[in-house]
Image (cartoon, helix red, strand yellow):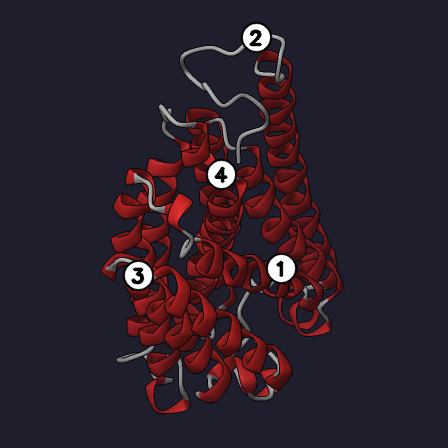
Amino acid sequence: MLPPLAGVATAMALGYLFWSVRPRPWQIANVVAFLANVAAVRSIPRLDSSNAMLQPLNYLTPASYAFAIWGVIYFLEYGFVCLQLLPRAQTELLRRVSPWWCGANACQVLWCLLFRPQFDSPGLLWLSAVALSSIAACLNRAHALIAAPQPDAQDGSVVLRVPVTLHFGWTTAAALVNWNGYVARCTSAPTPKLAVALLSAALATSVGSSVTVDRGSGLYGGTVAWAILAVGVQTVRSERLGEELGRGIAIAVGIAEIMLAAGLFLVAFGISYARNRVYKPGVGRSAASPSGGLRA
């Protein structure tokens, strides 16, 4: 994910911070976990690196443009692992989030190891789906801590909230994509693959709406909606899916997925707008969100 020049800059920045700040063990663990994640993603050949035409048709596949979100996620996470080394970042919230952050990165390394051609079989492909689901589970716990009311405004820093929320939202949908890939490996019959894909889209929308409302996290809902929308776009324009299901059915399914995404976008926007009005800085801060402003 990080080009060589960025890698050199990262090493220099982290080296300076380690020398000048003397971080705590959990801060060092956050850095090591992230660097292991980046190294695994860059160096381990995976199934998604190979020709998609050689893979069984996954009915829950996002359009390729949606994966640009990874650039944003890694850029923000790079900023987070650097800034969390600073003395002012040594907050109780960051310390509590650290195990889940490290766990998510460890699970992503495991996923890279398992999502390879030698595991591409009905008996083994489910392992990568479990690993990816575990990433989302760890980030869910981290996000729950971040979204909870904090006594210190610095604890809710955007530097922590935004990358964790984006990563959590994307992996929520990505885990379902991986499970649908497993189903596609187990059967070539269109009916079960279509049923699982539709259930997955509905589940992603339901989970996205629930977490968005319960935690007041419009960014999470927007991220899940981004993934569902990309699935709908790909479903509409996929020639392989049109041949397998029939063009009319594929378009109808894609439109249904796009409508689910639109509904979730509305929920996310509504929550963000409401929170921004209620907790606008200088207007009215409640005990529920002492730092005010838009929550991720």
Query: What amino acid is found at the position of numbered circle 2 in the picture?
Result: Gly
Q: In the image, which is nearer the foreground, mark 1 or mark 4?
A: 4
Residue contact at pointers 2 and 3, CB within 8 angstroms: no
Query: What amino acid is found at the position of numbered circle 3 in the picture?
Result: Cys
Instruction: Tell me the crowding category of disc 1: few under 14, some 14 to 19, or many 20 or more residues within 10 angstroms, Cα based.
Output: some
The residue to which callout 1 is attached is: 72
The CA distance from mark 3 to mark 4 is 19 Å
The residue to which callout 2 is attached is: 284
The residue to which callout 4 is attached is: 157
Q: In the image, which is nearer the foreground, mark 2 or mark 3?
A: 2
Q: Earlier in the sequence, mark 1 or mark 2?
A: 1
Q: Earlier in the sequence, mark 3 or mark 1?
A: 1
Q: Earlier in the sequence, mark 3 or mark 4?
A: 3
> Which one is in front, 282 or 64?
282
Q: Secondary structure at mark 4?
A: loop
Query: What amino acid is found at the position of numbered circle 1 in the picture?
Result: Val
Left or right: 103 in relation to 20 = left
Residue 294's label in the rendered image is none
Residue contact at pointers 1 and 2, CB within 8 angstroms: no
The residue to which callout 3 is attached is: 102
